[in-house]
Amino acid sequence: MKSSKNTSLGYIYAMQAFFAWGILPVFWKQVKHVSALEVLSHRIFWSFIFLLILLFWTKQKNTSQLLKQKQTRNSLICSSVLIGINWGLFIYAVNINQIVEASLGYYVNPIVNVLLGIVVLKEKLDKLKITALIIASIAVIYLTLDYGKFPWIAIILALSFGLYGLVKKTAGIEAIPSLSIETLLLTPLAAAFIIYKLIAGNGGFLVGSYSTNTYLMLTGIVTTLPLYWFAKGAQRIPLSAIGFMQYIGPTLMLLIGVIIYKEEFKKEQVIAFGLIWFALMLYTISMIRNTRKLKKN
């Protein structure tokens, strides 16, 4: 009974996380009049403040020890740069009405993970995953030819988050403590930029409306709370379930971009997204099969 309740709680946590990530574009639209770099600075600064509170609340006192180990410290420096790029580019994409392309990045991300697994971790793929990788690659090439330009926002989002996941996997550090150190490393730069904008008098914080001030301060909560929920959910439910649920976020982003913000979703994009959805279906089937095999063994 306790195990069943624990699993149910895990699904609730995971659903909350993916739903929150999916509707984030709506939040970033509320501060679209503030430059992406300033919003990113606030996102980093207030995330660090909120994470300090979260660490105190969860009684994790040994987080600072992570900086004392050279290999771990180097990994965290690398991951902090990658997550900074990912966060900043996503905010920028929303600001310039490219939510659809941003959602594509998060659809492509699992395939990037597979590719990184082959190249870096020397993982072997089954036929389904190889097929999924080929189909997704064709979709990206097709989309590039259709755009007449490389979909750089989608690809950089996918690569930065994929590399971020790779660094975290090889470092083997828990989500909340590692994110605390990552934001700690980025906070001096973020705080310096916020102060610069305040002194210059052309920033969005404390010189604009109360709502803008509130939204900028809330960037820390909307960034870290879904990650906390995801960490709690991932501990309680199967990996295959996480695999299925991870597409909730980009699907919501896509719907928000097209339905709410009236972004273009042409026939060629429908074809490309359809190919990627098919590739992801094959990828998920392969993951479920592998999970079942592991359970049997």
Image (cartoon, rainbow, N blue to C red):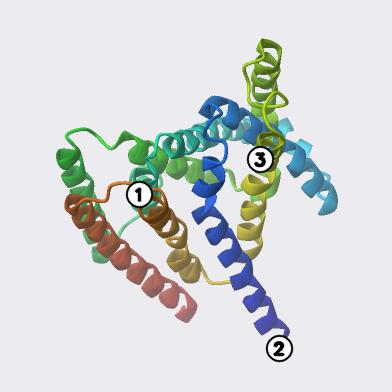
- The residue beneath circle 1 is 262
Q: Kindly state the secondary structure of the residue where label 1 is placed.
A: loop
Point out the tag, 3 or 2, that comes first from the N-terminus: 2
Residue 141, percent from left and from top: 18, 43
In this view, the mark in front (1 or 2): 1
Point out the tag, 3 or 1, that comes first from the N-terminus: 3
Query: Where residue 292 is drawn, which disc sits there?
Result: none
In the image, 257 versus 146, the foreground residue is 257
In this view, the mark in front (3 or 2): 3
The amino acid type found where label 3 is placed reads Tyr
Task: Determine whether, in the image, residue 213 is placed left or right of residue 118.
Answer: right
Res. 69 in view: no
Pointers 3 and 2 in contact (C-beta within 8 Å): no
Res. 54 in view: yes
Tell me the residue at 62%/28% (across/down): 41
The 10 Å Cα crowd at callout 1, few under 14, some 14 to 19, many 20 or more, is few
The residues tagged by marks 3 and 2 sit, at their Cα atoms, a distance apart of 41 Å
In the image, 106 versus 123, the foreground residue is 106
- The residue beneath circle 2 is 1
The amino acid type found where label 1 is placed reads Lys
Tell me the residue at 60%/48% (across/down): 172
- The residue beneath circle 3 is 215
Residue 207, percent from left and from top: 70, 23
The 10 Å Cα crowd at callout 3, few under 14, some 14 to 19, many 20 or more, is some
